[in-house]
Amino acid sequence: MATNRVWRALSAFNPSTRRWVPTFPRNAMEQTRQAMVPQRFSLISWNIDAFSSRAVSRARLILGHILEVPKPPDIVFLQEVTLDVRAALLNDARVRVAFLTTDAEDETAFENVPFATMTLLSNARFASSLEAPQEATDGVEGEDKIVLGRVSRIPLPSKYRRDALCVEVVRPSAPGSVARLINVHLDSLWHTLHYRTQQLEILSGVLRERGCGGGIIAGDFNAISREDEALVDKNGLVDAWAALHEWDESGGATWGVGVGRRDRLGRGGRLDKIAMVDLKAEEIEVLRPGLIEVPRPGEKSLEIPWSDHCGLRCTFTI
C-alpha cells in the first residue's frame, strides 16, 4: 500500500494545535535569490453537493475531472464533503500517492454537521517537517517545497455550524512570514446574510494578522444577493474573477447553470469565489460538471450533474 501522507485539522486557538517545524535553506545567498522569485500555484475549488443522489459516485467523477489532466492542481478545496465521501477520498489511490490531506486521522470535523470542508495539497509542492530535509526542499523545477505550518478550523458565527479550514504555509526562503490558504463554505440562504457579513470580515482579518504575508479565501461564498457581491470589496479583498474578467463578470456563474432547482434561489449565480490579499491572480476559469445516470426503479433513468455547483480553477503567484 502506498504511503498516505496526512496532516490533521485541529480546532483554532487550541494550544495543542499542531505546528510543523520548517526546514530552511542553509545558504543565505540562495535564500535571498529564492525570495525574489515568485512561485506559481494552481488551485481548484468545488462544492461537490452533499444532498443529491449518488454522492460518492459523483465525488469520484469530480475528483477524476480534477486530477486526470496533464497537470493536476497543486491545491484542492472541497466543500460539502460527507463522511462517506471523505472515506472514498482517503481511500483513492491517486489521493494517497500524490496529496497531503486534511482530516485523515479522525472524524472530528464531521461531528454534528451533515458535511464539512477538506483540503488537499500536492506533495510535489508542499512538505511537512516529517519528511527528510533533502526531500522537503526538492520541489518542482528546482524550487524549494512550501513547508506546512499550522492547520486549524477557525470557528465562525453561523446558523449551520460552519467554520473555515485554514492551512498556513511557509516559503523556506521567507521564514518570517506565513501565507494562509482558507477553504470556506459560508452560511446558506437569504436570511443568513448577517452571518456571511461577519464571517468574511473575520476571515479577511485573519489574512492581515501580524506575521501573515497574505493569502487566499476560496470556496462557496453563497453570494446570492447584491449585498453579498459587495462584501469582497468591502473587506479589501481582491476578487480573482472580477480582477481578470472585468469585461465579463457575469460569465463567472458557478451555480444553477443549466440546472433546475427545488428552491426559489434563481439561476446562474456567482456563488463560488476566490479572493486574495497580497497574492496575484494570473488565470481563472469555471469548470462545468458532467452528468451521471441515476437509476429509477420502474422508470427511465435520470441524468443529473455531478454537482449543482461548477468548480473554479485559479492560478496565482506567491
Image (tube, rainbow, N blue to C red):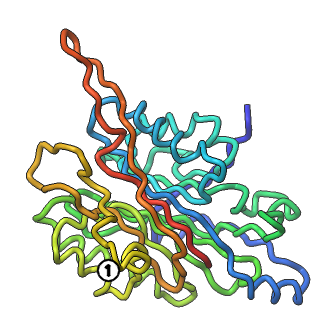
- Nearer to me, 30 or 4: 30
Secondary element at image label 1:
helix
Question: Disc 1 designates what residue?
Answer: 232
Q: Residue 278's x, y, as percent?
A: 52, 86
Q: Nearer the viewer, residue 258 or 255?
A: 258
Note whether 55 is above or below 81 in the view shown.
above
Q: Residue furthest front?
A: 247
Where does the image place residue 263, in percent across and percent down from the top left? 11, 48
Percent x, y of residue 26: 89, 80
Q: Is residue 187 left or right of residue 263?
A: right
User: In the figure, is residue 125 to the left or right of 16?
Assistant: right
Q: Is residue 249 left or right of residue 42?
A: left
Assign the C terminus to one quadrant of the image.
Answer: bottom right
- Locate residue 70 relative to residue 221 in the image: left or right: right
Task: Identify which residue, 266 or 215, lies in the foreground.
Answer: 266
Q: Determine the residue positioned at 26% across, 80% down.
A: 231
The three-letter code of the residue at mark 1 reads Val
- Give the residue at x 73% y 36%: 2
Numbered-mark total: 1
Q: Position of residue 292 (x, y in %)?
A: 36, 30
Residue at 31% of width from left, 42% of height from top? 50
Query: Quick one: quadrant of the N terminus?
Result: top right
- What residue lies at 56% left-to-right and 46% top-to-bottom? 104
Based on the displayed image, in which of its 4 quarters is residue 31 positioned? bottom right
Q: Is residue 230 above or below residue 157?
A: below
Indicate the quadrant where residue 184 lies: bottom left
